[in-house]
Amino acid sequence: MTMTEGRTGAARSFPAEWQGRWSAAHARIDQAGYGDLVAGAYRSAGPIVAARAGPAEAIRLGESVSFVAIRSGRRAACLLIDAALHAAEAARHPSELTSWLELVDDIARRAPKILSAFLQNGSQVLDRLGFAGLAVFARMGLDLGRDDAHRLAFFALQSPEARQLLERQHPSASLPGLLPGLKPYLRALWAISPPIVETPGDAPEAMRRRAGFGGGGVRLPPSYAGFPASDQKQLHRATLAHIGAHHRFTRKKFPATGLKPLQLALVSLIEDARVERLALCEMPGLFALWRGFHVARPEGAPVAITLMARLARALLDPSYEDPHGWVSKGRALFEEAAAVDIGSQQLSRHVGGLLGNDIGQMRLQFDAKSYVVQPAYRDDGMGVWDFGDDNPEVPYEMQAPAEGARLEQRESDDGHPEPDTLSDDSSGRAAMVEASEDVAVARYPEFDYVTGRERPDWCTVHEPAVPMASPAALHRAIEQRADLASRLTAIIKSSKVSRQQRVRRQAEGECLDMDAAIEAVIARRSGQVPEDRIYGRYERRHRDLAILVLIDTSASTGERVSGRSETVLETERLAVAMLAKAMTELGDPFALAAFSSNTRDHIGYQRIKDFAGRYDIAAEGRLAGLQSHHSTRLGAVIRHAGKDLKRQLSYRRLLLIITDGEPHDIDVDDRRYLVEDARAAVHQLRNDGIDVFSIILDSNAESYAIRIFRRQNCVQLKSIETLPEKLPGLLLRLALQ
Amino acid sequence: MTNLDAYRIAKEPFYRSVGGEVGLFEAAYRSRMPVMLKGPTGCGKTRFVEHMAWRLGRPLITVSCHEDMTASDLVGRYLLDAEGTVWHDGPLTLAVRQGAICYLDEIVEARQDTTVVIHSLTDDRRILPLEKKNEVVKAHPDFQVVISYNPGYQSVLKDLKESTKQRFAAIPFDYPEAAGEAEIVMREAGADKSTAEALVRIGARSRNLKGRGLDEGASTRMLVNAALLVAAGVPIMEACQVALVIPITDDDDLRDALTGAIAACV
């Protein structure tokens, strides 16, 4: 575009009153010395942006171009102009472009080296996630830490986090969104509940395209590429129905020793057909589900891969006709063997072997590297093979689900592995990996208040074992305050927290007790003295309360309480021990856990006592063994504890957090961020009917505590040493209000 | 004395025996031993009692127990009429006087202090004291108590007292095996064989979810209801929605999963 053309464009796009400002804007860029490339690009882009998003935005773009050119260089400025053209087109309202430019400025300010990568790939992200999604994406990337290489990989869409976010475009079609429905689906069909995990973002491409199983777990791709969002659920279902059929009917793994890739693929293919045929006897409706994804047609070049897809279809679909000799031979062999004994796994080994020889004789090429099982719902075929122990190609395959299995297994209940999983009766399969000492047990999203959205799977909660220590000192401390302990028991005992119950035959009350009233009248008529207790009322008679107490063990709890020899943690410990003792005596359900965090990847949640467990010497030992370290990242801990509480059936469910300061973590600079996340987590729990209370051992708590917990749900305790005697009273005050 | 003819069962209620339960019940009845029927909801406990009452030629008095039921609801009470007060026998007293089978359905729903009134009837005394009336009713030689009890259904808080439990002989019930259940569905709903078999497969799928989101899987009764709708011309997928999926859970994910599993079965 020449200067003249640019001016004519400008004349059309800028109304008369903007002409002057536009000239000034590009004159500034022209004279700033960013080079002709930048200046020319801005001159020609300005009118287009003005036409798409309004003249004000075109001029606003000029400011960003200057800023970016200074912070990140001329090349980035050129990229910005290109990206702005795209963003202007995508914007439905000028304000969207404004916030996009603000986002660019923000990145240029915080991470100038990263900006080019963002501008290059941002358009792709924008197309998939929209402006709001792009903002989430950018802020996630910026918060990855100060390591530029890591951030760069993120913005270049190379890191697992970035890919995961991109693939989760539609919540209704993404795997995490579908899993709550898919798990019971598999359970209903096949009565199994193996851990189901999403294939990690850093897995090889081949693994990301197809599902797999092994190691006692099932791995599903985040989404099936090339299929519309509306198909994703059915595909996942078809996959799970198919894998369930393997679980039921592939009783023993095939030894893989000495087999070529083509033979492996063909035996897998026949075995797939065999288990599906068996499954259809039980659930004929699966035919329609599976059949829909068989799209192979009797045409095209007879290469091994397409012939195999055609055979797969021929074996499932009796109405499918295929003239190719190899396909019809495969079908005949299969049907013949199936008529003899379809229950025999040898059938697959035998028929698959014969068909492999034929492919060889036809001199058809089979490229194992590029081979992807067809149709898409079938697993990658590896789960039915036993590769021996030392095969270098398999470990990844087996590891991924096992890794996930651990995540899920611990997640399933109060830390007790589920007995009824895939591994229970699969002789040839690797047993479920035992949960080791310090494993990641769950991932949680974190709420970003700036974008108003959650960052999916942002925090990883670990459950490290708690080192045991002798509870002798704790016992002595409790002993010293024995009077207090019994008072606490009395306080809790006298509290009535339950559903209301109807009490009959009262001398006074809010309603008539009909039975009593009738009896009284009868008594009077028959000349007897009537009973005067003829009223009823509703009252709370019991305590139906489940409490989970969370103890902050961040580094600051290691400091001494002012003017005393104990540390904050020791005080917390004593208070909790006394509360636990009282609750145990009364038989009320309660749980204790401690928390601390060391970046979003390592949030420690130490279980001292679970609801199901007993408060015994071991639990006391764990309580005594707590140590102060790391930081306070509340949100994920609240979500994790909430999951335990949600399973309790009590009338009131309380989460009590004893903390000594504001949420903070070393990978977060923004003070407000963790506060807002904790607030969101508290809010979420409240929606689930769980009350969250906090006792804050910090005299400056007002700034954040009220924001997180609401004023009536938190208590600030300035004299920390009084915590032990005050805790139960505070707790009940909070609970009964 | 009230005539119990209305409580007699004239026509044989269809019941398909799944094990030795008919023989066991007859043996227990011979000594009028109290019997407890244990099993999930809708598996045929009530039908079984009806069938046995018909078989033994005894009237059957059924009481559905509930939380607010008092001992007077079972035993009887004085009521008022124009003349003054009149005593009305409760269902239990009626059965005791006239030798009926008294069936207390879902007994754990009643409060424990209510259920103790059956204690004197369920040991060798076989008497029912009517305190208010100052009368002790000796049980008719044919009188028997039968209770039903759904172990998976009530909470920990609701359970029978040990002293109540130990008075009963218990017969366990469960959903019949597939072929038997299909026969029941065919018979009860007039369904054709393939519909009945599909519904039974669906039932089995839903029972896989017991304890995994569902408190109970679909009962035989639900399957019969679905079959009745199918027989009335409702397409099977829709019939299952109405008779099964929607009543059984309010969780959208579970409904979705169940619908998928139903589609896999038809």
Image (cartoon, rainbow, N blue to C red):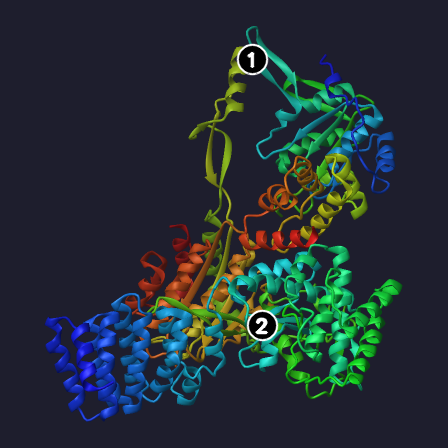
Q: Is residue A532 above or below residue B252?
A: above
Along the line of sight, the residue nearer the viewer: B207 or A270: A270
Residue at x 37% of width, y 71% of height: A660
Along the line of sight, the residue nearer the viewer: B227 or A111: B227
Would you say A204 lies left or right of A19 here? right
Check disc 2 and give the amino acid type.
Pro
Check disc 1 and give the amino acid type.
Leu
Asked whether the viewer can see residue A694, the reply is yes
Q: Position of residue A261 (x, y in %)?
A: 73, 84
Q: Choose top left, top right, bottom left or bottom right for residue A682.
A: bottom left
Q: Choose top left, top right, bottom left or bottom right for residue A720.
A: bottom left
Would you say A421 lies left or right of A533 here? right
**Chain on which label 1 sits:** B
Residue linked to disc 2? A221
**Chain on which label 2 sits:** A
Residue at x 71% of width, y 71% of height: A310
Would you say A117 lies left or right of A284 here? left
Q: Which mark is residue B80?
A: 1
